[in-house]
Image: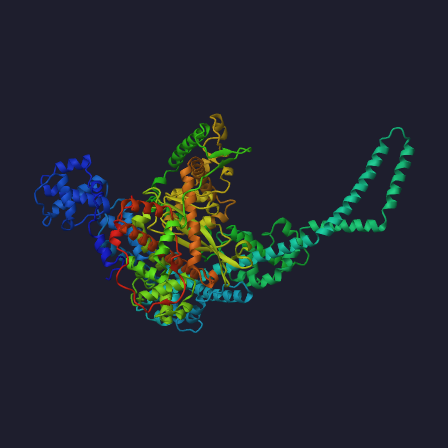
Amino acid sequence: MTQLAFLSPSEKRKFDAPPVFTKSQRPAYFAVTDDIRRTLSALRTATNKVGFLLQLGYFRHSGKFFAPSTFRPRDIKYLKEQLQITEHLDFSNYPSARVKQQRARILELLGWTTFDTDSAAYIARHVQLQAEQQIRPERIFAAAVDFCWQQRIEVPTHHQLASLITDSFNIVESAWLEQLENGLESGDCEALDAMLEATDGLPSLLGEAKTISQSRQAKGIKKNVKSCLAFGRYFAQFESAYTLLDLPEKATEYYATWVQKATLAQLKQFPNRWKRYLHLLAFIKHQYSLRQDVLMDTLLKSTQSAINAATNAEDRSDLQQRAAQKEAIHIVTKARKSAQHVLDEITTITRNESLFASERIAKIEQLLTDHEALQSDQVRETLQKSELFLEQQTDTAKTYDELEKRSVSLQLKVSPILKALEFDTTSSDANILAAVKYFQDTDGLLGKSAPLDFLSPKEQALFPEGETLRISLYKILLFKSVAMAVKAGKLNVRHSYRYRAIQDYLIPAEQWLRKRNYLLSMAGLQIFADGPAVLAELKETLDARYRDVNGRIRSGENEYLRFDKKGTAKVRTPETDFSEDGFVGQTLVDNGIVSVLQVLREISQICNFIACFKHLSPKHHKLKPSDDTVLAGILGKGCNIGIHKLSQISQGINQSTLKSTVNWCFSLKNIQAANTQLLQVMDKLPLSNAFQHEPGQLHTSSDGRKVNVAVDCLHANHSFKYFGKDKGVTLYTFIDERHALFHSTVISASEREAAYVIDGLMQNEVIKSDIHSTDTHGYTECIFAATHLIDTAFAPRLKKVGKQTLSSFSSKGVHQRRGDVILPGHTVNKKLILSHWDDILRFMATIKLRHSSASQLFKRLSSYANDHPLYKALKEFGRVIKTRFILTYFDDLELRQRIEKQLNKIELANRFSKAVFFDNNQEFQDGSLEDQEIATACKVLIQNAIVLWNALYLSQELLNTKDRDEHDEMLAAIKSGSLLTWQHVNMQGEYDFSRSATNDCTFDIGKIMALRVA
C-alpha cells in the first residue's frame, strides 16, 4: 500500500535522526539530576553510562529514541569529558537488550509511555478524527507529533507514523464506502449512474455549481432559486443515503470540491463505483447546503434593504414636513395658550368672593363670548387641520404604509426564496414556522386564514378580523419576521452551513456524555475539567490583582493613572520607539530595487513553498505544475492582476496551463501550507526572533482592512465611511511581533471582527500566540473567556477603558471597606457559570477539535444573546478574565506599550497589503467568498516572502559586518525598525518567466541560522 506523502526526503532523514545540539544546548539536555545520578551509579560500563545519557538527552529534545549507530560523535565526546571517561567507546554493537532496558528506565523517569500497540491505537483514534475532516496529511502528521507530546507518548518513527496516518485515511474512507455498499439501494445506484448521462443531470449541475449568482436582482435570484431546487430534488431523492452515510461537514466539502473542479470524463473514470457515488452524494449535499445559505443571505439583505428604504423614506418625509410641523405646533400651542388664559380668568372670577353669583356668571359669559368672537370658522378649521396633521406625524401606521409600498418589489425577490428554503421543524419557533409553512403550502396565495400569531400585538391590530387582508403588508411583515427570527436563532435552516441551530454545531450531546474525559484530553482541556477549582483559583488571583493595583495607586507608585471628577480612571501611555522604516527601509533601498518575482524565486530556494501546490487529491500526482506556473498564479491572484491578464502581459507562461494549475492546485489549504513553509523558516531565523520582547513569549495582533468589491457580491456591504456609494468587505489579518503574517480571512464589512479572533489563533500550527491584541472591534467578554481556555492571554486596546465595568467575586462594599480606589461594578455570578460549566467545556472542545469553527459558533451563539444560557455563562466567565486584564493594564506600563507597538505593526501590515494588492484599483474582481479567500491568501504569501527576504538580506549584512561595535549598532537599528518594508520591491511591470532562475542561492542559510543576535 502506498503511503501518503508528509515530508520531503531530507525532512524524513532529519525526523529520524538525533538532534544536532549547539554548545550551549548540551548542558541543558544532558543535565544529570539526582534520580539520573542514581541510575548511572547502577551502570557498570562507560558505554552503558554514556549510552544512557545520550538516549535521555535526545529524548528530552525530540520525545523519541534513535538507533545507537546514529549517536552524534560530538555528543559522545562531550559526555566522555563530563564523566571523565578516556577509553574509546563503540556503539556499533550496543546490545539491543540493554538499549530496550535503558529506554524503559528513561520513560519511567520522565513519566512517558512507550509507543506500543495500545498507544498506537490511541494515536490512531486522534488521527481518524482529523482524517474524517479531510485535513491535509502533512498537518495531521504535525498534529500527531504534538498529540504525542501532550499525552506523553513516545514519538514513533516517520515510517510508523506515516503508516498509521495512511491507514487512518484508508480506514475512514473504506468505512464510508462500506456503508454505501451495504446500505445503498439498487434504485439509488441506478439513479446516481443515470445522473452522469442525463442532460439535465450532472452535466447541468456541474455548470450550475460553477456559477452561483452574487446578484440581488430578481434575475440573479431566480437563477439561484432554480439551481437550489434542482439540487434539492436530488437531495430528497437520496435522503435515505445521507441518513445512512453520516459524512462530516469538512469531508463533504472536500469530496464536493473535487467534483466541482473535475470534468465529466474524470468522474466516469473512477474504477471503484462506490467511490464515485461517495463523491456525487457529497457534491449534491454540499451544493444544496451552500445554496440554502446563499438564498438566506439574499433574503436577509434584500429584506433589510427594503426596511432601510422605508425608514429613510419616512425620515425624508419628516424632514420635508418639518416647516409645516413647526407651523402646526405654533398654531396648536397658540390655541392652547389662549384657552389656558380663558381658563385662568374664569378661575380668578370664580374665586372672587367680593362678587355676587349673578355677577360671576355674567362676567364668565362675557369672557366666553369675547373668546368665541375671536375664534372664526377659519381659525377653527386651521386648528383642526393642524391637530390632525400632528396626529398623523406620530401615527405608527405611516411606518407600515412605507413598508407596504415596498412590498411588491421585495416579493419579486424574496417570495421564491422563502418557498425554496427548508427549515428545521425541531429547533424553530412554532409560530413563525407555521406562517412560513402556510406561505409555502399556498404558494404565496394568501387567504383570510393566514396565521397572525408570529406578529406582535400592535402588528396583529393592522389586520382586523372580518376585513380584507392587506396582502402586501402581511407579506413584508412576514419577510421581516423571518429575517429577525433567523438572526435570533428562532428559525433555523435544516440543511445549511451557517444557519443551523447552535446545538447542531456542537459535539453531539450523546457523544459528549459517553466520551467526555477522552474528548477533554484530546482537546487539551483537562486542566479546566473541575469548574469549582478553576473559579477558586481565579478568585484568588483576581483578589490579589485588586490588592496590588490599588496598593500601588494609594502609594503613588502608578504615575500614569489618574481619575477625573466623575471618578473615571484615565491611563496615559508614553510612545514607544517603534519606527516604521528608518534604517531598515533605507538599507534595503540602498541595496537596489528587486522584482517581486525574484523575491519569490529566492525564497522558494530557501523553503520550497512551491511544492505545497499539490493536486486537490492527496493521492493524485499526475499534475505537477512547473515552478514558474505556480509563481505566475500567486502573482495573478495575490497582486489582483487576474490570471487572464497576467498570462497576457508575461513571457513564458501558457494561459491554459496556468488556468488548469490554479483550478486544481490553488486550494486555500495549499496556499496556507505554502505560507506555513515560510513561517517555519521565520520561526527559526535568529534575526526574526530578535524582535521578540521576551524569549519564549510570543505577542500577536489582528485588525481589519476594508476593501472595495467591484462586482456583485452577496457578502459585501455598503458603508459610506469606507466605500462611499460602493460596497466592500473586510480583510481580517493576524501578525506576530516578528512580522510574520500567519492568518488572513475575508468577512462581511458589517460583521464584528471579534467572532474571528479564535479562528486566527488556532489556524496555524507554527505560530503559538501567548498574548494577543486587537482594537475594540475585536473584543467581547466571550472572546476573553475563549482565549483563556485556549491558553492565550487576550490583551486588547479598549476604547475608554476606564468606563469598562469591572467584576469581582466579592461585593463592592467589601472593596470599599478595605480602601480600594478601583472598585468593581458587578459581582460574579458563580452559580450561573458553574451550572453551565460542562456546556462551556463542550463548546470549547468543539472548537479545539475542529468539529466546528469558532466563528460559526460565536456568530450563532451571539444571535441567541437575549436568552441562551450558554452565552450568558460564557460571557459571565469572560468578565472575570476581562477584569483581571484591565487591572493589569492599568498597572503595567510595559504591557500597554507592547500592545500599542504590536497594533502599530498590524496597521503597517494593512498598508503593506494595499501595496501588494495594487492592480484593478485595489478592488476585488471576484464576487465569491472562495475566490476572495484564495486571492487574500496569495497576497499574504507574497507579503511573507518579502518580509522573509528582508530578514535574510539584513542577516547577511550582519554576517558581513566584522566590527563588533558596528555589528551591535546595526542590530540595534534593525530591532528598532520593522521588517514590513517594501519600497525596494518592484511589484509592477512585465513578468518574464522565460529566463530561468539561477540554481545558486543568494543567501547562506546555514550561516544565517547560526547568526548570534543576543
* The quarter of the displayed image where residue 413 is located: bottom right
Q: How is the image coloured?
A: rainbow
Of residue 909 and residue 460, the one placed in the foreground of this image is: 909
Of residue 840 and residue 699, the one placed in the foreground of this image is: 699
Q: Report whether 716 appears left or right of 175.
A: right
* The quarter of the displayed image where residue 7 is located: bottom left
Image coords of residue 573 (percent x, y):
45, 39
Q: Report whether 911 appears left or right of 631.
A: right
Image coords of residue 672 (percent x, y):
36, 57
Whether residue 520 is visible here, answered yes or no, is: yes
Of residue 401 and residue 722, the one placed in the foreground of this image is: 722
Of residue 43 and residue 262, the one placed in the foreground of this image is: 43
- Image quadrant for the N terminus? bottom left
* The quarter of the displayed image where residue 252 is located: bottom left
Image coords of residue 115 (percent x, y):
22, 48
Image height check: is 893 above or below 89? above
Whether residue 245 is visible here, answered yes or no, is: no
- Image quadrant for the C terminus? top left
Image coords of residue 610 (percent x, y):
31, 61
Q: Residue furthest left?
A: 87
